[in-house]
Image (cartoon, rainbow, N blue to C red):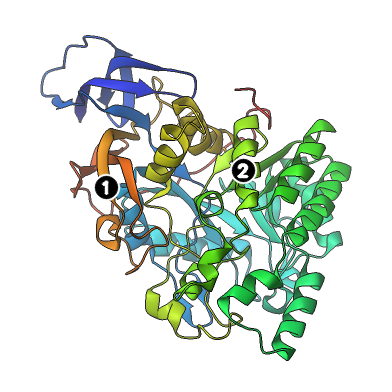
Amino acid sequence: MKTLIRGGRLVTEIDSYDSDILLEDGRIAEIGKGLTPPDGAEVTDASGKLVLPGVIDSHVHVSLDLNGHVSSDFRSTTRAAAFGGVTSILTYVTPKKGQLLSEAVAERKTQAVGNCHIDFGLHASLVNWGDRQDDEIPEMIQAGIPSFKAYTVYSSSGLKSSEEQLYGAFLKAGQHGGLIEVHCENEWIIERKIKRLAEEGKLSPADHAASRPSFVEGEAIGAVLRAAYDAGAPVYIVHVSTAEGVEVIDEALELGLEVYAETCPHFLLLDERKLSGPDGQRYATCPPLRDEQHQANLWDGLDDGLIQVVATDHCEFTAADKDEDASDFRKIPMGLPGVGTLLPLMWHFGVSEGRMKERDLVDRLCTQPAEIFGLCPRKGKLAADSDADLVIFDPELPVTITPEVLHGHSDYSPYDGFEVVGWPVSTMVRGNWVVKDRELVGSHELGSFIRRGKICQKPGRRGI
């Protein structure tokens, strides 16, 4: 299949320029002005629009079971992603007790293959440590899964890593070219606060924020970074939500630690006042929404290169799922939908409001996720021989965010009613249109597993 997209303005992580782009056999064949369409090529006019690399959402939860509520499946998640200009997701393999990572990976692939509108990769979760074997990390790396998720919380669910286990994972991953990503919160402080709040009958969604104050993130990130530094291994901190977290990461980078970090749109744009509203339970996530004073630090962290990635931590439940136990935050299924709004929100509130440049947006949503997680050079760039994953984006299109325009699983959005200017209109994966002129045209059988290669291909702190 051959497609020529002409008349658009291409935006890369370096600059932007008017150009045509020729796509052949699922790859980018040529970029240049005035290209002649080959015989039989489809010609698409992108005049007045931007052509971007396909967005990579590197933090997505699919079919996550929390308190008996199951989040969106592969088909609905990737459909919403495609409408939002996302062409690849990285999601999680979490083995059950007694299950090897390789067994859990095989199960996860079976769930995904034939049910994805876009491409997918996997992170392996290092949980239920009594079942883990020493050779599992290098085995996963050889299988094209070079990134691993660890937690400093959730010991009751078997998710937490002890300090010794985490240190051992850093050593093993560092020796074999893997990357450990860590959910950082101090569990002891959180459990103590939850116990006290429960004794006082304070279990509303607003009390959820009080149970996880901002300093528990900064303290846990500091401890994790010290372990990674001593092990001589790179580390990736997921969903940074606080000024304290940004400060600790800045200090670690100054010391020369190879640390990477992400934040999420909900921490940049929403604050803990949402938890006190009539539907506060629908904004409950972990870490919780913070006081708005933290937002400026997160935006500054993005601008300074302390935070390299914006991802969503997408975890999409319905309103009924969130509402069922609204009076007890311990039972609310935590997580927010976001994969379909990542690009338009960051364009409107980042680029249009002057917080970041166009090239910064592409860098944080496309290029650096690809470089950090081993998708480069196939994904994340507009370059010859890269996969023809791209988005045609209309920077002047006004859209009011509603569940209907997101095409996902949930009947609510934390951004419901937000009015943004700039929206993806067409999305292509490996030369195949998935969404064309805001209509779904691609099959849910199109997406394939991304076998990833070398991680951390660029320095953690890139000068912009």
Q: Three-letter amino acid code at disc 2? A: Ala
Q: How many marks?
A: 2
Closer to us: 404 or 300: 300
Closer to us: 12 or 146: 12
The residue wearing badge 2 is 296
Residue 51 image-quadrant placement? top left
Q: Estimate the x, y position of residue 48 in percent, counting from the top left.
A: 22, 24
Q: Estimate the x, y position of residue 244 in percent, counting from the top left.
A: 75, 50
| Mark linked to residue 356 | none
The residue wearing badge 1 is 399
Vertical relation: 458 (above or below) 117: above
Q: Residue at x 73, y 74 (%)?
A: 155
Q: Estimate the x, y position of residue 174 in percent, counting from the top left.
A: 76, 42
Is residue 69 visible in the rendered image? The answer is yes
- In the structure shown, which secondary structural element does the residue marked by tag 2 occupy? helix
Q: Residue at x 68, y 32 (%)?
A: 460
**On the rendered image, what quadrant is the C terminus found in?**
top right
Q: Point out the residue furthest to the left here.
A: 40
Closer to us: 459 or 180: 459
Vertical relation: 275 (above or below) 142: below
Q: Three-letter amino acid code at disc 1? A: Val
Tell whether label 1 touches label 2 (CB within 8 Å): no
In primary-sequence order, the first of circles 2 and 1 is: 2
Is residue 455 visible in the rendered image? The answer is no
Q: Residue at x 72, y 83 (%)?
A: 197
Vertical relation: 87 (above or below) 72: above
**Which dot, 2 or 1, sits closer to the camera?**
2
Q: Is residue 226 left or right of 424 when viewed as pictured? A: right
Residue 417 image-quadrant placement? bottom left
